[in-house]
Image: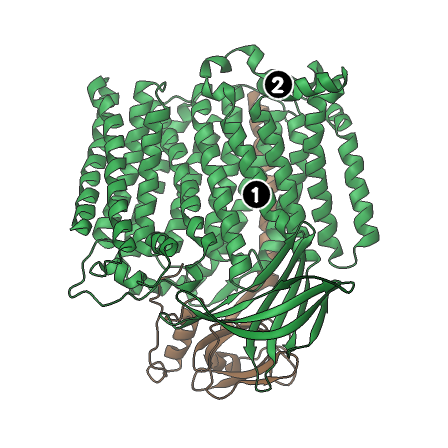
Amino acid sequence: MIAEVGHFALIVSLVLALAQGTLPLYGAARGDVGLMRLASHSAIGQFLFVALAFGCLTWAHVVSDFSVLNVALNSHSAKPLLYKISGVWGNHEGSILLWVLILSLFGAAVVVFGRRLPATLKARVLSVQALVAVGFLLFLLLTSNPFLRLDPPPLDGRGLNPLLQDPGLAFHPPFLYLGYVGFSIAFSFAIAALIEGKVDPAWGRWVRPWTLAAWCFLTVGIALGSWWAYYELGWGGFWFWDPVENASFMPWLAGTALLHSAIVVEKRDALKAWTILLAIITFSLSLLGTFLVRSGVLTSVHAFANDPSRGVFILFFLALVVGGSLLLYAVRAPALRQGGKFTPISREGGLVINNFLLVTALATVLLGTLYPLFLDALTGAKISVGRPYFNATFVPIMTPLLLIMGVGPFLAWKRADLGAAMQRLKVAAVVSAGALLGVLLLVEKGLAFSLVGVVIGVWLIAASLSQLWERSFARGGGMAAAGRRLRGLPSAFIGMVIAHAGMGVVVLGITGATSWNTEWLGMMAPGDEAQISGYSLRFDGVSPVVGPNYTASRGTFVVSRGGRTLYSLMPESRQYPVTAMPTTEAAIHSNPGGDLYAVIGDPDEEGRWGVRLYYKPLVGWMWGGALLMFVGGALAIADRRRRNPALAGRPSARPLAGRAPSEA
Amino acid sequence: MTPKRQRLLLVAGGVILLTGAVFLVMAAFRDNIVFFYSPSEAMARTIDPGQRLRLGGLVEEGSVSKSAGASVEFRITDLSQTVTVRYHGLLPDLFREGQGVIAEGAFDGAGTFVATEVLAKHDEKYMPPEVAEALKKSGRWNEAGGRGGPQGTTP
């Protein structure tokens, strides 16, 4: 019964979305207020019905209703409750339902937070949002219905892939989707603006918080995914340039460019057509990511043969959305009037370079991801494009971007004095030079990469802190006055400083974990000791462990340093009987300085166990930095001027926009 | 600066950047693409020792021998040709005799494939599609039991 309610709720929301996708558009064109208002009501209704459907599927998973095919295939009665719930989106149908849920959630959020939006713009935004929802609801109902019944029901389910039974992965997809799908709002605003034929600073002010929110979620989602790969897959790696990872990384790159170019629209009324195009590209890449991951095209182009309808449906939908919006763009964008002028050396100029470099980096990632697919489809040759390709293309493009990132915020709008900006960065430059010297003196391995990485990381952090200094202490008046100024800074500014510094922290983490990584590999019998990076690990043997739905062999390593016993590491090798699948549970001890990481493999005939140990300096900084970026983005959204648009127009409340460093 | 000159500058900057990026990409593609071969294809071609490639097939039953220091030797087969593979490291969780596997590495002078990475995919239902295809090509797909096939849902 519950499953049928869910199915019915999906059909109702499809009908609502169809109405919402057409009538308000017509109403906005005709100036019919009643039809335009319909969009708000139906957006809320659509969200409620999709939420109901999602609740029904969750219920079926929680009570293990194996008469529902989706539950029978992906769940098992012995699974812990958390994984019964996360199992809802641990499969194809459920994850698409989550996609739609978040899509309609964002639509409803536009209604709730967009009370001051102009009526026609709001109606059009919600209509476009609904049209996207129509596509995905049809996809669900026609090819991926999660509510199909199974008669007779099996006694128990087939279980969830044990790799997915992990808290990190329980929350990874929702965050990733909040990011992916969050960009749909920027897309809807872009299409609505093209239909209206008008892009102005107010438009930029509306779009930016949504873009920031999506970007924040996507940042966390990607970080969670890489953290999961790090501790769950047992290889000690955190990023593999795997096509599935690239699929989530490309919208992030485009979204980062978008959120910076939207600043120029908001503050200077320039780069309008470009920003619209970026919004379209960003969401298209989100769709492409969904397509790549969900159609099975990545495991093989021939996976279409297994379920051709799904892949073809998404490909068709992707072509429709991308083709349609680019066509609309081609027709309407030339009509957008060119806005504020600026010279190449200016805040705008810096943001244009940021956009150039981000989009170029994006293009190389896109090419590296899709080229094997094209080559296979055209010639049948099978190739893999892996880390060496991305290191050789992505890194050289990002390096200048990250260096310029330290300078950009010091440039004034319209026309800036590069010399004066560099003057303000003197301290940051000296600190970075010190870091360079330190690396030359102390670091032995991976010198080239660590030089670049450390200098960039330190430079970004120092340059960001210099901005805070510039706005507080540098203006004199002692500690008290500086503190007062710091508290008075707009939170969007503080957010930018934190996010930029967070990027520096990420770079340092990546550098440490890749350049200075130490690995130890060997067979160990109980009582043996292994040495790695100054730590000594004594292997105390393996004992059997029984978990809720698995059995495991748990090894014990006693870690000591300089003769002092510190802690023990207990990696496991687990066996899940339901899916007959082994997994490796790494044991990790984290310090700010680095992680000690232990994995056990199989025993040999003489009772010795395969052991792999890593010491990864600074690896935790990567996720810490991602968290800082999230916090920075959240602070920027929370900016007082944004919550109260009346303030934004007042010159006194626009230090970000107006004040040139020369006034400082 | 006139809008026209400004636009010209933007376009010029973009073109320079794109040219640089294209150059980088071409160089990276030339040096870093790794081809996938089945044992039969690898035998039929002349592959220089040291050239990186991916080798995929089934782990031959009874061929796995572990030696001291976490080194392991096994044979990859597409049921018509086999290649001996040497690997120093822990094998992935899903590595099993008779199952699909992909090894990345290069041949040494003596015709042994020295792997730097051994991949067995996440899902036990799932055989790497390249392996499935290699088996179909060698005409031995059914003998391998037509096992799996790429139908498993990936995470």
In this view, the residue in front, A102 or A325, is: A102
Residue placed under numbered mark 1 in the picture: A626
Residue A492 position within the rendered picture, expressed as x and y whole percent measured from the top left? 56, 26
For residue B137, what is the image quadrant? bottom left
Q: Position of residue A105 (x, y in %)?
A: 33, 36
Q: Name the subunit of mark 1.
A: A
Whether callout 1 and callout 2 share a subunit is answered yes
Which chain's colour is brown? Answer: B
| Number of dots carrying numbers | 2
Quadrant housing the C terminus of chain A: top right
> In percent of the image, x 79 and y 50: which residue is there?
A439
Q: Mark 1, mark 2: which one is toward the viewer?
A: 2
Of mark 1 and mark 2, the one earlier in the sequence is: 2
Front position in the image: A257 or A64:
A64
Q: Is residue A285 visible?
A: no
Q: Residue at x 39, y 55 (%)?
A: A293
| Position of residue A6 measured from the top left corner of the image (x, y, whole percent) | 21, 47
| Residue at the bottom extreme of this rendering | B62
Residue B4 position by quadrant: top right
Judging depth in this view, the residue of A232 and A237 nearest the camera is A232
Q: Is residue A178 left or right of residue B51?
A: left
Chain at numbered mark 2: A
Whole-number angstrom distance, CA of label 1 to CA of label 2:
26 Å
Check disc 2 and report the residue beneath it: A488
A344 to A623, vertically: above or below: above
* Amino acid at dot 2: Gly
Name the tint of chain A in the rendering. Answer: green
- Residue under the point 30% across and 19% down: A119
Circle 1 Cα neighbour tier, 10 Å, few/some/many (<14 / 14–19 / ≥20):
many
- The residue tagged with tag 2: helix, strand or loop? helix
The one of A364 and A476 positioned closer to us in this rendering: A476
Could you tell me if residue A139 is visible in this image?
yes
